[in-house]
Image (spheres, grey):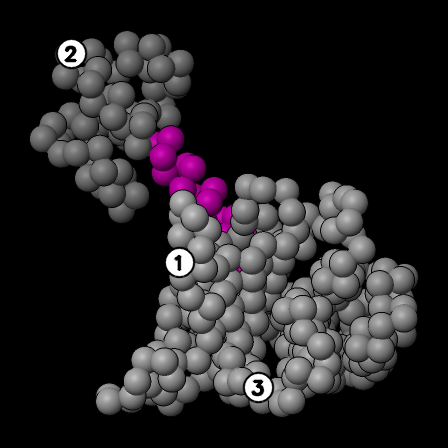
């Protein structure tokens, strides 16, 4: 059955890949994002506007493989998308994250700390540790404040004095660009955020016009939309992303149902302890006797078990 499903998915992808209908490319797609921003000239323009640099300040950008030797499969699934070393030995991580992640702050701290100590050898002076910059491009809202862009540094809580320049966190919240007003819309970084969030060719053209870095990206996006292999890999990532969202929703729904059932088991346990029979309990809970009978029977048979243990017994029947 699984093999049949995989075959049908592959056929569907092939059909869409060779379809002559207009094909939009969105940079929030992980495949498209990586293909575009792993190119030095493309990411250079983005970093100039994000970090307020002048072009001559960037002497070299070296894009490294984000995987290091010794990492296991589980670690690789969570590794950041792009890992860069800028001149001055600054280390930069860039990650596109589409789905909401509650522990995003801890995740970014973890990777920046790991990057900070990477390559540091016993006996080295601490001043040799390179500045580390984590850039999160988020397709969900993380911060409570309304701005689409946030820069987080280490500062004294009372005086605001900078503690160290070697740890920085930059967050771009794409969904907040729609409600951004005033001067913030005129900043070059805003155009980058809108370009990454763009879902139509009209939006891509509007945001990229007049910026040679963005115009280059637009050209590459158009080429990607015309290349069968790129279309296939792009669509495969789209389907994988949809599957991940569906799995998360299913897990959430299962959690809600489990919570309701546990609550019902707990209420039935309390009523059984008061020597109420099945009919009385069903009437008080406004449920049919048929629906709650399995719970009632397990509670009667196992009066000393917890609600969680009764839940497990019911699910194993």
Q: CA distance from mark 3 to mark 1?
A: 27 Å
Residue at 85% x, 72% y: name it: 211
Say which residue label 2 marks.
Answer: 274
**Which is the main secondary structure of the residues drawn in magenta?**
helix
Q: CA distance from mark 2 to mark 3?
A: 74 Å
Residue 139 at x, y percent in the picture: 63, 56
Does residue 36 belong to the magenta stretch?
Answer: no
Which mark is in front, 3 or 1? 3
Say which residue label 1 marks.
Answer: 106
**Is the C terminus in the top left, top right, bottom left or bottom right quadrant?**
top left
Q: Is residue 147 above or below residue 191?
A: above
Residue at 41% x, 37% y: name it: 257
Region rendered in magenta:
243-261
Residue 315 at x, y percent in the picture: 30, 43
The answer to which of marks 3 and 1 sits earlier in the sequence is 3
Which mark is in front, 2 or 3? 3
Q: Quadrant of residue 47?
A: bottom right
């Amino acid at each position: 059955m699984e093999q049949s499903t995989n075959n049908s998915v592959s056929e569907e992808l092939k059909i869409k890949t060779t379809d002559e209908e207009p094909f939009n490319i969105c940079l929030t797609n992980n495949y498209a994002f990586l293909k575009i921003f792993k190119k030095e000239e493309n990411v250079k323009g983005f970093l100039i506007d994000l970090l307020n640099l002048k072009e001559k300040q960037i002497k070299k950008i070296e894009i490294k493989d984000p995987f290091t030797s010794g990492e296991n499969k589980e670690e690789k699934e969570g590794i950041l998308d792009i890992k860069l070393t800028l001149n001055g030995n600054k280390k930069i991580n860039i990650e596109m994250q589409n789905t909401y992640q509650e522990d995003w702050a801890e995740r970014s701290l973890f990777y920046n700390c790991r990057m900070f100590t990477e390559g540091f050898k016993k006996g080295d002076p601490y001043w040799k540790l390179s500045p580390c910059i984590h850039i999160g491009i988020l397709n969900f809202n993380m911060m409570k404040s309304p701005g689409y862009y946030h820069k987080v540094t280490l500062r004294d809580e009372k005086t605001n004095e900078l503690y160290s320049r070697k740890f920085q966190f930059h967050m771009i919240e794409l969904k907040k660009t729609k409600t951004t007003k005033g001067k913030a819309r005129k900043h070059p970084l805003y155009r980058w955020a809108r370009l990454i969030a763009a879902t139509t060719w009209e939006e891509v053209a509007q945001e990229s016009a007049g910026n040679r870095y963005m115009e280059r990206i637009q050209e590459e996006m158009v080429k990607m939309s015309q290349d069968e292999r790129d279309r296939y890999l792009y669509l495969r990532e789209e389907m994988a992303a949809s599957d991940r969202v569906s799995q998360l929703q299913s897990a959430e729904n299962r959690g809600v149902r489990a919570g309701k059932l546990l609550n019902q088991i707990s209420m039935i346990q309390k009523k059984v302890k008061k020597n109420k029979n099945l009919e009385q309990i069903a009437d008080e809970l406004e449920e049919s006797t048929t629906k709650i009978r399995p719970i009632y029977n397990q509670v009667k048979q196992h009066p000393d078990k917890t609600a969680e243990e009764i839940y497990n017994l019911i699910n194993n029947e």
